[in-house]
Image (cartoon, rainbow, N blue to C red):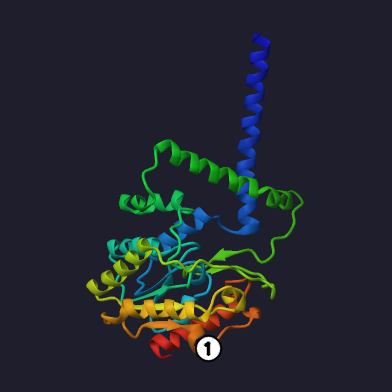
Amino acid sequence: MKKFVKKIFILLIISSVFIGMYCQISSIATYKYNGPNTAEQIQMSFDNAVKNDYNCYFLGNSRIYRDINPDIFTSVQAYNFGHDNDSYNQMYYKLLYLIANNESIEYLIVGTDYFQFSFLSDTRNYVYSKLFPKEYQQDFGDKSWWSTKQDDYITFWSNKQNALLPCIFLLFNRPAIDVNYQKANGQYIVYGIADPEDVIDRDYTILDVQLDYFRKIINTCEENDIKLFIAMPPLWSGETETHSDDERKKFNKMIREELKETKFKENYINYSEENGLSSYTDFIDVTHLTPYAADLYSKYLNEKIFGE
């Protein structure tokens, strides 16, 4: 029996050393071949957002995070504070974070999408719950300490499993090509080529909780004398094919109605309404612009807002 216990103990030590080594190597490999992970991206974004004297911020989901280059906006000091899967609850608490850090916000440009109000995403809460006040978590319901830890461990191990291929690349010293990265101005650069046959079906539902947060953003901007703009990035047919023009008209009307009684009533900028659908060649996938097209869109938005 003692020999058996001893063997098990030795096996556990060897396994722990192996797992520890894999975790260390996987972190190095994923950073080299895939760029910073989600938690690293978010932490860098928060740190950099209050590092310089910015007076113009962008908030939104991945179509802001990847599709807006603040360097194009030369008449202001701009920062891209967007992130994948963000909706209006995350945007609202990011706005409060900036205000709490005494940022002098003159302009806030908030992204929207036809699906933007349809979800309440908790996929980044293992990071956001540490950065936002306790009130943020209330919309997701009460979770026990153990349940939260379980989610953290599942996310951690899922990331490590996804690191297997980069580890193999590192083992064979394969060169890193077109690695995703976050710029100092907050924009996330991702490479790719869209498939012209790609189609995505979106949910156009308007959740009360997200509409309430949208209104909170508007009210906070009015109270703090921040010039607010709502921006809809470019779309192509893969994004719009499964819905009707009437559905999009209804959404656009809703946005304008929300701004109607405010000083921001003329500040809804919908690229596709003005310019029609874009070519799939402007996209890296069904929804995100190429870095080059993102610069072009940023120039368009800069001209619409700042007249440059």
Q: Secondary structure at mark 1?
A: helix
Residue situated in front as seen by the camera: 97 or 229: 229
Residue 214 x %, y %: 34, 68
Q: Along the horizontal axis of the image, is 29 left or right of 154? A: right
The residue lying at 34 percent from left, 60 percent from top is 93
Residue 242: give x, y in percent of width and height: 58, 73
Q: Residue furthest left?
A: 223
161 w.r.t. 81: above or below: above
Looking at numbered disc 1 in the image, what kind of residue is underneath it?
Asn
Instruction: Residue at the far right: name it.
Output: 172
* Residue 299 seen by the camera: no
Position of residue 283 in the picture relative to residue 257 (left or right) = right
Give percent across and percent down for residue 1. 66, 8
Which residue is drawn at the image coordinates 45% and 48% (left, top)? 126
Q: Is residue 29 visible?
A: yes
Q: Circle 1 sits on which residue?
A: 275
Along the line of sight, the residue nearer the viewer: 257 or 2: 257
The image shows residue 286 at horizontal and vertical percentages of 61, 71
